[in-house]
Image (tube, rainbow, N blue to C red):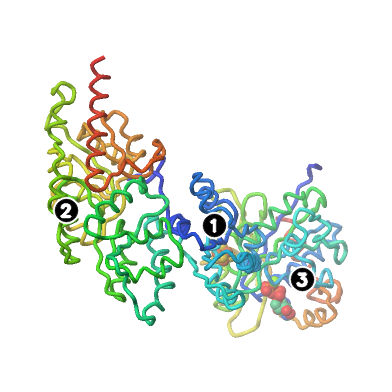
């Protein structure tokens, strides 16, 4: 089957590393290789990204003769020295771009020498280019950062935070809708008396990363955060929960699990109030009651970490049927087993052609996915944006979450509005 | 831009390192120049010693000049006239263990094209003296369209050198369908040793070529090297010099 992508935007490990590092505000990032490549694409990606990486990300700008003669080692050394001299950074990260990775430039050795000379800590990403999953790059960056910055915290005799504090691991500058989701997560956790300390690598510093071991719980938002969470569990006995809360029931179960893990009581009065949201009442009201039909099916496109709770929300809260799920990344082994047991037709990273064919065959009424899915399935009546890429939407303010109870309300509201709009348009 | 209308003979010499490519290339260039032909020899080996005995000194490499002078680079920076007007060029390349020699060849060729090297000097013959095995795409560039048309492989009777010959021949064959260079034959550069001649003859079929010419091992090569000269220049009346002249004659007949 063809793997040609003209709609799906395949991002690789290299981009994943760049996404991750752009959230760590005091790390200088040297991209060792030719100007251009994905680096250019990345650097010009969005206004927000540009602001984040301004004055902090650079490319050694290798040219043909550098590639041929020395792998540009001299340019790399010069770049390290220049970044170190700026004095604004606590750490330097060097990433081999596809060119320097291909010819095997020994950036570790150059980094070691330059590190000794300049006294600034340096982490390297020598050959993180070829894997097709950007998640792997984020994972790698997280593990390197955490290992590098937290390792010596072990000997320092940890003082746990007095309040019950939580880290969220996984979201990057690329994560769709994160601002809103973070707000809702903080709200939910505050009812359990918990405070979110750091979100890595979305918005953090090396100092904050050093304090990760002081937290009482890690919330792993994406698969990319798992390895770092496991490291913190192994070395600092911090338990972690994998996945975020989606849907009415899903959110309740998620909070229940956290309460159990941390021996915290659940504030039931508040929970009752939150869960009183009368979904079906609204469903029955839309479009004079003629449009609420349980035969409506849903196609879903999301990463494995979201899939279970999203399916639960559609089937148990909305009482609709899931016709097909496109997993946007390959699930971990245990994850795959769990998802399989849900007996929903599930397709792991299908090609564009395959996914289009599946959608044509199952004819869903509702599509929940990314801008890519929307492009491939224009004829499906109702669309909801739940993952990136989302180049077709703006999200300025933090009041449109997907997670938690507010997220559930928000998604339900969007769904109802879309159906109403469809009803009006199709009546015309 | 001057367009070159006269036909140019483009030859690539391949073979295992140390087998005698540069010695043969330089003497071939010298012998061709004696015939009144304008020859350009391009060394495609990071060692950059292909034209050493033609130019009597190390020629600055294209890559080093490019690194130093960037856009200010000129042909005269790296094209040096040697014995009898032979134009000497060295691509250059990394010190062992760093960089990418293959990209070096590509970059140097691009630069020469950009500067219209061939159009400017209008050579009758261009000889590419290319490093050892074809390890990757870069080393096959001289085989591609617009570069060499005739390929010669140098080998002795040693197993490794015949093995390299076999690999080079395969690369040439792979490119045949694209209309690239043709393998014209194997040039046997003797190193002595038992059954050498027999081994070469046995290997020819597997390599898929014929024996084009045979050179004996002759200390006159080293004697001339001491004077920083080719055999053609340093010992013009030697038997070996005549062998190189014979090669030049045959090559031009192809
Ligand atoms: N016919 C020959 N007789 C004696 N010595 C030779 C002969 N051909 C080459 N050599 C010696 O072999 C050495 C290596 O040859 P060279 O041309 O530099 O090999 P290559 O270019 O293939 O690496 C040279 O220094 C030269 O002295
Ligand atoms: S194998 Fe070829 S392309 Fe790869 S680094 Fe070496 S010379 Fe360059
Ligand atoms: Mg040589």
Kindly identify which chain the residue marked by label 3 belongs to: B
Q: Where is residue A75 in the image (x, y as percent from the top left)?
A: 65, 65
Q: What element carries label 3?
A: helix
Q: Label 2 near label 1: C-beta < 8 Å?
A: no
Q: Is mark 1 on a helix, strand or loop?
A: helix
Residue for point 66% across, 81% down: B191
Q: Where is residue A81 in the image (x, y as percent from the top left)?
A: 63, 68
> CA separation, marks 1 and 3?
28 Å
Kindly identify which chain the residue marked by label 1 belongs to: B
Residue B81's disc number: none
Which residue is under mark 2? A340
Q: Label 3 near label 1: C-beta < 8 Å?
A: no
Q: Position of residue B180 (x, y in %)?
A: 60, 51
Q: Position of residue A9 (x, y in %)?
A: 41, 45
Which residue is under mark 3? B243
Name the one closer to the observer, B136 or A414. A414
Is the residue at mark 3 from the same chain as the one at mark 2?
Answer: no
* Residue B205 seen in the current view: no
The part of the image, by quadrant, that contains residue A372 is top left
Residue for point 51% across, 63% down: A27
Q: Label 2 near label 3: C-beta < 8 Å?
A: no
Which residue is under mark 1? B173
Q: Quadrant of the N terminus of chain B?
A: top right
Please indicate whether residue B192 sits to the left or right of residue A18 in the image. Answer: right
């Amino acid at each position: 089957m063809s793997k040609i992508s003209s709609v799906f935007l395949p991002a690789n490990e290299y981009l994943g590393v760049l996404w991750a590092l752009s959230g760590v505000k005091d790390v200088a990032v040297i991209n060792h290789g030719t100007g251009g490549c994905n680096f250019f694409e990345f650097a010009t990606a969005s206004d927000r990204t540009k602001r984040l990486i301004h004055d902090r990300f650079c490319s050694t700008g290798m040219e043909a003769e550098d590639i041929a003669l020395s792998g540009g080692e001299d340019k790399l050394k010069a770049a390290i020295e220049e970044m170190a001299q700026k004095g604004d950074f606590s750490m330097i990260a060097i990433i081999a771009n596809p060119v320097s990775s291909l010819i095997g430039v020994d950036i570790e050795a150059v980094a070691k020498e330059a590190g000794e000379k300049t006294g600034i800590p340096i982490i390297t990403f020598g050959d993180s280019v070829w894997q097709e999953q950007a998640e792997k790059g984020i994972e790698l960056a997280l593990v390197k950062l955490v290992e590098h910055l937290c390792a010596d915290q072990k000997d320092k005799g940890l003082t746990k935070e007095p309040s019950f504090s939580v880290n969220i691991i996984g979201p990057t500058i690329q994560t769709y809708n994160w601002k809103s989701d973070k707000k809702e997560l903080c709200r939910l956790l505050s009812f359990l008396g918990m405070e979110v300390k750091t979100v890595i690598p979305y918005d953090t510093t090396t100092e904050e990363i050093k304090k990760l071991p002081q937290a009482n719980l890690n919330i792993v938002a994406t698969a990319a955060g798992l390895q770092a969470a496991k490291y913190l569990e192994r070395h600092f006995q911090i338990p972690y929960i994998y996945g975020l809360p989606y849907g009415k029931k899903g959110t309740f179960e998620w909070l229940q699990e956290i309460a159990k893990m941390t021996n915290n009581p659940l504030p039931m009065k508040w929970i009752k109030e939150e869960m009183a949201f009368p979904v079906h009442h609204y469903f029955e009201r839309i479009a004079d009651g003629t449009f609420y039909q349980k035969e409506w099916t849903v196609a879903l496109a999301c990463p494995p970490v979201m899939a279970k709770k999203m399916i639960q929300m559609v089937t148990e809260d909305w009482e609709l049927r899931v016709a097909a799920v496109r997993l946007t990344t390959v699930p971990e082994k245990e994850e795959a087993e769990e998802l399989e047991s849900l007996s929903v037709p599930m397709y792991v990273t299908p090609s564009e052609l395959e996914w289009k064919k599946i959608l044509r065959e199952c004819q869903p009424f509702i599509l929940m996915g990314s801008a890519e899915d929307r492009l491939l399935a224009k004829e499906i009546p109702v669309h909801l944006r739940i993952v990136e890429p989302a180049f077709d939407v703006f999200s300025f303010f933090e009041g449109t979450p997907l997670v938690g109870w507010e997220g559930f309300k928000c998604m339900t509201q969007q769904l109802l509005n879309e159906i109403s709009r469809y009803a009006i348009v199709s009546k015309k | 831009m001057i367009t070159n209308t006269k036909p140019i003979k483009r030859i690539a010499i391949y073979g295992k390192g140390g087998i005698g490519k540069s010695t043969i290339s330089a003497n071939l260039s010298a012998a061709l120049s004696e015939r009144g032909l304008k020859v350009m020899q391009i060394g495609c080996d990071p060692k950059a010693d292909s034209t050493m005995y033609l130019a009597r000194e190390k020629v600055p490499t294209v890559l080093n000049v490019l690194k130093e002078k960037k856009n200010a680079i000129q042909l005269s920076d790296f094209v040096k006239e040697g014995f009898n007007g032979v134009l000497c060029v060295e691509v250059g390349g990394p010190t062992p263990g760093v960089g990418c020699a293959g990209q070096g060849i590509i970059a140097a060729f691009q630069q020469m094209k950009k500067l219209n090297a061939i159009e400017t000097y209008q050579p009758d013959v261009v000889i590419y003296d290319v490093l050892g095995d074809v390890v990757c795409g870069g080393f096959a560039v001289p085989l591609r369209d617009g570069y060499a048309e005739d390929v010669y492989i140098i080998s002795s009777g040693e197993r490794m050198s015949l093995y390299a010959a076999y690999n080079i021949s395969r690369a040439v064959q792979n490119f045949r369908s694209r209309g690239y260079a043709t393998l014209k034959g194997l040039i046997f550069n003797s190193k002595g040793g038992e059954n050498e001649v027999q081994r070469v003859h046995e290997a020819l079929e597997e390599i898929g070529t014929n024996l084009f010419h045979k050179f004996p091992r002759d200390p006159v090569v080293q004697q001339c090297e001491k004077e920083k000269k080719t055999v053609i220049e340093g010992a013009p009346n030697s038997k070996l010099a005549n062998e190189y002249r014979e090669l030049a004659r045959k090559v031009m007949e192809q």
